[in-house]
Image (cartoon, rainbow, N blue to C red):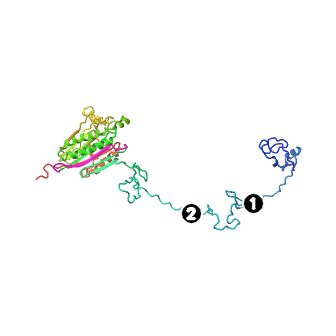
Amino acid sequence: MSQMPQLSACPSCEEPLESGDLFCGACGFDLSAVPPRPDVSPNGSAGSVRAAAAGEESAEWPVAPEVDSSDTPVPTHLPTDLPGTDSEGGELPERPGAGSVAPDAASAAPDEYPLPAPGTPAPPAAPTPPAADPRTAAPDATPPAGTKLCVACRSGRVDPDGYCENCGHAQPRERDHMEQELDTVAAVSDRGLRHHRNEDAFAISTAALPDGSPAVVAIVCDGVSSATRPDEASLAASRAANESLLVSLPRGTHPQQAMHEAILAAADAVNALAAEPASAREHSPHQNAPACTLVGSIVAGGLLVVGWVGDSRAYWVPDDREGPTVRLTEDDSWAAQMVAAGLMNEAEAYADERAHAITGWLGADAYELEPHTASFKPDRAGVVVVCTDGLWNYAEAVEEMADAVPADAAARPLHSAQVLVGHALDGGGHDNVTVAVVPFPFVPQGAGSA
């Protein structure tokens, strides 16, 4: 049995050792694996002298041969010269061309990531087909009856919540933009650029008088935004007034009286909206009654009749522009009261921030309903422009309205209504805007008689 070398300190942690230790008491190093220290170090340093003085057994170290490396090339090692193992510890198969014969093709492992030779250009990538433009994509060949298609992509179907199932685009609500045209009257309503919904409404129609002559009707209503459900109020009022006129005019009621009765019917319809269940009032105790304004026009038998409550207006614009353009209504508003009382001129009153505070409206909380009606007999052909303040705020003076109405308004009422709505939107579109254009054909007295 060979004698263990006597060490004074652990070779690993340099902790002092006791005589006869087989393992370091600090780090557990196996002292039996330490070779005897040589008497003379390879470089002849003083370490060998100290080891000899300590009486430690010396060991002879082999002398390194002297090699002149000036002309000796550095040995080259190839990757194939080095052994390797796979992830499980087994030997890797030899690659073809590395001094071994290629294995059978059926059992050879394919080179999954071949590298091209240096300087070899990469093969061109296959072209990616362009994505189909949803705006030009053809809709389904046979969509089910009644299916609404998206106004944005023209191919997706609209779900019950009002969103496209294909592109997710929110669809415009039915009342955001409305247009209607009859032979002798047309109307357009738009939400505008600032409001989240359209609180205006209109109704246009034609009826036959007892003598068979036509009567043309246009009703325009503007919901009061500070009231509850103003969009429902304007819709109910316009429908009720129109239905009332379609009943009273054919049975011979004078058009001005028929207009008065129509306004009362509209007021009843709006008042009915305030009759909510008690539970609804409990959940929303601070809500006020629905409310709206109304302006209407009847053209029948050479007579022009207008009726109104609130600040929606009617204008007379002659075709030849030689006669004056006239505002046919007076606003139920704070500004109009100041002008009527002589306290302000019109420019000062409408410049005040209180100008558009209305003093008359349709609704259960109206102070006292006073329908206004008036009859005119124009002496020439022209058009009646029936509108909400969403338009006349951008053409307040009669001269501005005359300039905004197209010259061919009588021949193209729908186009004229569209132009007037565009005029308001171009001006800023701060409010909902609704316009009805009613042509007034002038018939000279005695024309057509024998």
Of residues 1 and 241, the one drawn nearer to the viewer in this rendering:
1
**Quarter of image, res 18:** top right
Q: Which of the labelled discs sits on residue 280, or is there none? A: none
- Asked whether the viewer can see residue 383, the reply is no
> Taking 5 as reference, is 134 above or below it?
below
Q: Amino acid at mark 2?
A: Pro
Depth check, front residue: 328 or 140: 140
Residue 412 location (% of width, % of height): 26, 52
Q: Any magenta on residue 60?
A: no
Q: Residues within 10 Å of mark 2 (few under 14, many from 20)?
A: few
Q: Which segment is the magenta one? A: 194-212
Residue 330 visible, this orientation: yes
Tell me the tag on residue 123: 2
Against 353, is 71 above or below? below
Q: Pointer 1 and pointer 2: residues touching (CB < 8 Å)? A: no
The image shows a total of numbered marks equal to 2
Q: Which residue is mark 1?
A: 75
- Disc 1 residue crowd, few under 14, some 14–19, many 20+, Cα 10 Å: few
Check disc 1 and report its element: helix, strand or loop: loop
Q: Amino acid at mark 1?
A: Pro
* Residue 159 picture location, percent across and down: 40, 51
